[in-house]
Image (cartoon, rainbow, N blue to C red):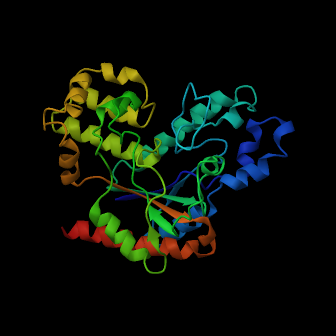
Amino acid sequence: MLTLVTPHAGALPESGYRFYGPECHAELPDRFDDWYERGAEVAAAACARALGIDVLAAELPRDVLDLGRPFLERPPEVETLFGKSAVDKWSRSRLVDGGAAELRARYYARLAVIREASRDSMVMVEVHEYGKKGSSYDQASSSRRPTRRPECALIPGSPWNTSDLSQLHGLERLLPGSLSGQRADLDLAVLDSVFPAFVPGPSPYPSRSPWAVSSRFVAGRFFRWAGEQGLLPADTASRLQDAAWGDPLNPAWLDLPGASEFGARVNDWSADEGNDWADAFARAGSTAAVVVELRLDQRERAAGFGECLAVGLRTYLAGRAAG
C-alpha cells in the first residue's frame, strides 16, 4: 500500500571510496558528510517502525550517486541545484577508470529495485532533509539573500511542471503540466499530524524539479493509466512506464506508436481533451506521492518527526480504505 524512500540517506560512506583514486580520499569524509541527510534517515526509520514497513534507501552516498537526479549522458557545463546529473562534475573528474560505467549500472539497478517494491503501492513517501537557509548554489550567488526555511515542508513540483515546451525533453513532453502526485487528503493528513510539534511552511523550491524517485513513480503510473483508458496503445504505454524508471529524457520515446499524437493532445491549447487527463488520473485515486523535508537543525527531533509522519500516513490510508 505504501512505499517509503530516502534517496539521499542510508548508504555507508565507505561504500563510495573505491570509485575515487587514493589521492582524493582525504577530501571524501567532509564531502560525504555534508551531503548525507541524517535527519531524513532517522525520521524515515522511525516512520517505518511505526508502520511496520521497510525503508528503501540509497546504496551509495549521495555525493557519489544521486538517485534524485537524472543520469545525464551529457551533463551541463554549468551545474545548478536542479540542473545537474546523478554524478556531479566534481565526481566525474575524479572517478577511477570504469567508475562511471559502474555507477550508471548501479543507478538503474537501484531504481529497478524501488520500482518493483512499489509496484502494488498506492502511495510513495519520499523523505528528505534541507539546510537552514538556501542551497549552496543560492549562497554562491551575490544576487540571492538568505531566507530561513521552515522547520518542515511538503515539496510540490515535477520535471514537467512548466508551460515552456522548449524546456521539456523526452517523456516530459508527454506529461500534462498539471500532473502531480499531490492529493489534498494526503497533504492535510500529514500536515495535521506534524503540527504543532513541527511548524510546516511553504516549499523553498521552484515547482519545476529534477527527476526525483517519486516523480518516476507518478509518471509511470500515469502512463499505465493512459494505457488502461485506451489513450495510448498498450505496448507504447508499457514502454513509457519503463522509460519513466529509466532514461526519461531520451527523445526516442516520442517516436513510439501513438506517442506524438498523445503529446499533441496534452499540449493543445485549443482543446480541453488531453489538458484534463491529469484531473481524470487524480480522480482515479490509485496513485499519490508526497515529498517531505525536515530542516537539518531539527535532527535531534527527527525520530519524533517520523512518528508524527506515520500518524498522518496511517490516517490517510484508513480514510482511503473506508472510502
Q: How many marks?
A: 0
Give the camera-side residue of 136 and 190. 136
Quadrant hosting residue 269: top left
What x and y, as percent, mark residue 47?
48, 69
Across and down, in percent, residue 86 comes to 58, 38
Q: Quadrant of the C terminus?
A: bottom left
Quadrant for the N terminus in the image: bottom left
Whether 81 is drawn above or below 121: the answer is above
Residue 215 percent location from the top left of the image: 40, 45
Q: Nearer the viewer, residue 202 or 256?
A: 202
Residue drawn 59% across the image and 48% down it: 143
Question: Looking at the image, which residue sits at the far bottom?
Answer: 196
Residue 311 visible at all: yes
Is 290 placed above or below 188 here?
above
Horizontal and vertical percent position of residue 201: 44, 67
Q: Report whether 72 appears left or right of 222.
A: right
At x 78%, y 51%, the residue is: 29
Q: Specify whether 45 is left or right of 201.
A: right
Quadrant of the rendered image containing residue 308? bottom left
Residue 88 shown left or right of residue 232 in the figure: right
